[in-house]
Amino acid sequence: MRRLPPISLCVLACVASLFACSAQAQGIRPSYRPSSPTLSPWLQLYNRNTGPLDNYHSYVRPRQEVYRTFRQQESVIQRQGEGLRNLGQQVMSIRQEPIRSTGTGSTFMNYSHYYNFRGPGR
């Protein structure tokens, strides 16, 4: 077998690096959420039970309660998000209104309303 000289190996490595491109996996969309649980809680019903409760009360019912709690929390979070979006829109509409001046002008140490500065002949 014939060996390549070191210079040709360097040239070959440079050419390979010029034509190399990055590979990316397809991946899963981060917004994917299944509409129902991916595994049924009833799969645990036929496990061997070692505790004092039956399998329904040990595995199935607690998992169903957890799913129910998750659905309730999800709806609360969605309502809060809608409320925050509405507040954000209200803030943006308030910021777009022109700023109006408030009250009237004032002066420092103005006692003219306490003392009569008009002369006696006026």
Image: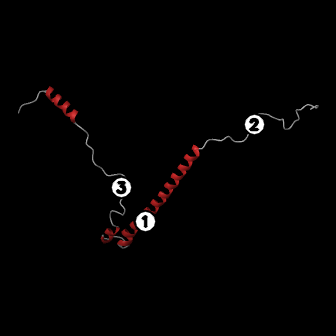
Q: Position of residue 64 (x, y in %)?
A: 40, 67
Say whether residue 106 is left or right of residue 96. right
Residue position for label 1: 68
The residue at the far left in this view is 1
Classify 10 Å Cα crowding around label 2: few (below 14), some (14-19), many (20 and above).
few
Q: Position of residue 69 (x, y in %)?
A: 44, 64
The residue at the far right in this view is 121
- Can residue 52 be seen in the rendering of this structure? no
Tell me the quarter of the image containing the C terminus.
Answer: top right
Numbered marks: total: 3
Q: Position of residue 67 (x, y in %)?
A: 41, 64
Residue position for label 2: 106
Q: Quadrant of residue 114?
A: top right
Residue 10 against residue 28 in the figure, above or below: above
- Can residue 99 be seen in the rendering of this structure? yes
Residue position for label 3: 32
Classify 10 Å Cα crowding around label 1: few (below 14), some (14-19), many (20 and above).
few
Residue 54 against residue 105 in the figure, above or below: below
Tell me the quarter of the image containing the N terminus.
Answer: top left
Alpha carbon distance from label 3 to label 2 = 62 Å
Give the number of the disc on residue 11.
Answer: none
Classify 10 Å Cα crowding around label 3: few (below 14), some (14-19), many (20 and above).
few
